[in-house]
Each structure stands twice: as structure tokens, then as C-alpha cells.
Image: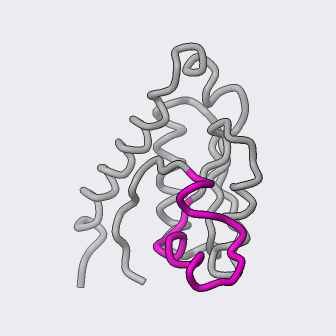
Amino acid sequence: MKTMNQFMPAFRIFTVSVLAAMLSVTASAQSDWPKAKPVTLLVAFAPGASTDIVARSLTQKLSEITGGNFIVENKGGAGGNIATTQVKRAAADGYTILVHSVAFAVNPSLYADAGYDAIKDFMPVALGPKTPN
């Protein structure tokens, strides 16, 4: 059985990757982001799921590092398609971030109309840690 300490290196890499991606925007945007308004991490599954735990841990560290406000919002249902479609419709300004699982890539081939195209509609920010189901 793996302990939480065995997942920490992957989580640290994930956190650093997200921060690097978020902080690589232009200098003018850096002065405002994320302090202009709260950043919402939309989790595609119910509270307590592994994706939710990762998102909550991430928002805590991001708040400490950036001084910005981060909100975790859970929108479970339809294998994650509800949250994914909501993020697709959100403004592409960096204030709405999707936290999903492998279902993000699989769902378009499982559903006749998943509501999104994983390649055309989204820009990857970071790869998250591997977590048990």
C-alpha cells in the first residue's frame, strides 16, 4: 500500500508545473493575475474524489505563493462532461481552470456528443499526479 509521502514528489512536480505555466503570461497580465479576481478550479467529480483532493491541495499552495484567491467548485456528472463543457464556455482568461482525470481524453470517444473536443477546445496547463482510483 502506498502512503501519502510516496505521492508527494509527483504533487510537487505538478504544483511547480502549474505555477510555471500560470506565471509565463505577459508582464502586464502578471501584475493583475490572480489578484484581479478569484481563480476557479472546476473539478469534474464529486467532493472527496482524488481530483478534488488534488485541487484543494493545489489551491492552498497557490494562495500562499501568489496571494490570490482560489476557489474549488465541484461539478460532477456525466463522467465529467458537465464541468468540462462549463469550462469550455468560460472566458479564456486564466480565471477558470479544469481539474479532470483520464476521462477527459476518453469521453469524446464514449459519448456521441461529449460537448467538447479535447484537442481543439482546451490548452493543457499541467499534468497532475497519479492517484489511486
> Could you say which quadrant of the image residue 94 lies in?
top right
> Could you say which quadrant of the image residue 82 lies in?
bottom right
63 versus 122 height, above or below:
above
> Could you say which quadrant of the image residue 77 lies in?
bottom right
- In which quadrant will I find the C terminus? bottom left
Where residue 118 appears, as percent x and y from the top left, is: 56, 63
Where residue 105 appears, as percent x and y from the top left, is: 50, 71
Where residue 51 appears, as percent x and y from the top left, is: 51, 68
**Is 36 left, or right, of 133 in this rendering?**
right
40 versus 100 height, above or below:
above
**Is 91 left, or right, of 5 in this rendering?**
right
- In which quadrant will I find the N terminus? bottom left
Which one is nearer the viewer's eye here, 108 or 104?
108
Write the start and end of the magenta stretch as one range. Answer: 99-122
**Which residue occupies 61% across, 50% down?**
97
Q: Is residue 69 magenta?
A: no
Magenta segment's dominant SS is loop
